[in-house]
Each structure stands twice: as C-alpha cells, then as structure tokens.
Image (spheres, grey):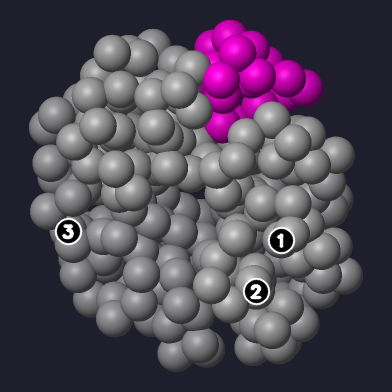
Amino acid sequence: MNAANKLELLPAVDVRDGQAVRLVHGESGSETSYGDPLQAALAWQAAGAEWLHLVDLDAAFGTGDNRAQIAQVARSMDIKVELSGGIRDDDSLAAALATGCTRVNIGTAALEDPEWVAKIIAEHGDKIAVGLDVRGTTLRGRGWTRDGGDLYETLARLDSEGCARYVVTDINKDGTLQGPNLELLKNVCAATDRPVVASGGVSSLDDLRAIAALVPEGVEGSIVGKALYAKAFTLEEALAAVS
Ligand SMILES: O=C(O)c1ccccc1NCC(=O)[C@H](O)[C@H](O)COP(=O)(O)O
C-alpha cells in the first residue's frame, strides 16, 4: 500500500509513428491520433498528474521505435515517469533508464527471457515493474500478439525473483471504455503481496472509485488513457475523485 493510502493515477501517452495515439485492445492499426506526445504529456503534468505512463508502441510491436522522442518527453517532465514498450534487452533497458525515468515496465521479456529479467530485477530492484498483459489468464507478449504462458505461474516465478511491482492489463478491456476488470485485479492482488498498477478500460470516475476501493487489497495505481483523451472526465476531476 502506498504511504498516502490513495490511488495513484498515471495518465498514458502511447506513441506510434511520432504521434500520441489510442488503440483498441492494443491492436496495431486501430489507432486514433491525438497529436504531439510532448504536448499531451505536458498537459497531464499541468493538470496535476504525479505520474506519466509513457509507451513506445512501435518498439512494442517491432515496427521501429520512437526512442529519441520518448527520451525527450521523459526528460521534459518534472513528474515521475513509467516507461513501457519494447524494453527487452540491455540496450533498450539502458536507453530507457538513461531518460531518468522513475521505472520501466517490462512485458515480452518477462515471458521470453526470464533469466535476463531475473538479472535486471536483482540489479535494479524497484526501477523494474513487470507488465502482465492478459486475455483471460493467458499472458500476451510482442505488442500483445503472442501467447506467453499462464498468468499465475508467471506471477509466482516473478515474485520468487523479487519483482517489485506489476502492471496488470486486461487486453479485452484496453482502449474500449468498458470499465476495468475488477475481478482480475482482485485475483492478482490475492496471489501476490506486491503492489499492482491497474490498466485498461477505465471509462468513468466511478470506475476509478471502484479501483481505489481495491487499494487495501494491493492496488497502488491506475493507468488512464482513452477516457482522458475522449474527455469522459478531466484529470483534475479524476485526481479529486481518488483523493
Ligand atoms: O504498455 C505497453 O507496452 C503496450 C504494448 C502494446 C500495446 C499497448 C501497450 N500499452 C497500452 C497502455 O498502456 C494503455 O495506455 C493503457 O492500458 C490504458 O488503457 P485505456 O485506459 O483503456 O486506454
């Protein structure tokens, strides 16, 4: 549980081909563009965000990367930054950490290269979060395009390796404005004593209040993407709702 016992909010900036975009179910080709990523990130910061969830979607999908631009955005922030997308080896990890981000989110590598992930958890501790991106209880890697094993087996392995935190996404909910998968969040919290960051599907202030009710069970934060871009509520309203 975080010190303030309050849900942390992480507005998302997902970058594809140099633009801030939203996807539906994380599917390549389902993008809606929302312009310059730096302007989006600065707007969330100005609205009172304490965190930014910044994703390089091209790196996640293997369609190139936006590394220089992502670094520029991360370095321009006065707030904490969680970097995600395509961090799979020493080179991409070094580039991500060199931006000064607060932590990185490892996805595919946690499924495909467990030895490397165990090594970086041991080296970097709290700076490493692992993204558990699931359909049902099956993990997905490579930009959510490939099956990557059982959620709870992987969680037990990562717990035993000392993983500090999990970012849990229900892919079926992501970018859909259909509400978060509260059952999944509760089940993951019951299976681990590490903090959980919820991701995917937030559509309303009531959704955020429902996630905030899970803070005592171990949910630490919630990523919010589409709902903010679609103006379902403002970030100021969201922050007030969970304070
Ligand atoms: O985070 C990743 O590495 C990633 C990889 C491939 C596709 C999507 C990815 N992230 C998407 C996000 O983190 C979303 O911004 C987040 O789940 C917000 O979802 P929503 O509030 O439903 O828009």
Residue 84 higher or lower than 43, as above or below: above
Quarter location, residue 99:
bottom left
Where residue 44 sits in the image (x, y, percent)? 49, 79
- Residue hosting label 1: 215
| Residue under the point 35% across and 77% down | 79
Residue 180 higher or lower than 4, as above or below: above
Part of the protein shown in magenta: 132-156
Query: Amino acid under label 1?
Result: Val
Query: Amino acid under label 2?
Result: Lys
Tag 2 and tag 1, C-beta contact below 8 Å: yes
Label 1 or label 3, whichever lies nearer to me, is 1
Quarter location, residue 210:
bottom right
At numbered mark 3, what does the secondary structure look like: helix, strand or loop? Answer: loop
Residue 66 higher or lower than 121, as above or below: below
Is the C terminus in the top left, top right, bottom left or bottom right quadrant? bottom right
Q: Magenta stretch: residue 48 in it?
A: no
Q: Is the residue indicated by label 2 positioned so its CB lies within 8 Å of ligand 1?
A: no
Q: State the residue in front, 70 or 186.
A: 186
- Identify the disc placed on residue 6: 2
| Residue under the point 51% across and 87% down | 48
Spatial CA distance of label 2 from label 3 is: 27 Å
- Identify the disc placed on residue 229: none
- Residue hosting label 3: 99
Where residue 13 sits in the image (x, y, percent)? 46, 61
Label 2 or label 3, whichever lies nearer to me, is 2
Is the N terminus in the top left, top right, bottom left or bottom right quadrant? bottom right
| Residue under the point 50% across and 36% down | 131
The crowd level at tag 1 (other Cα within 10 Å; few <14, some 14-19, many 20+) is many
Query: Amino acid under label 3?
Result: Thr
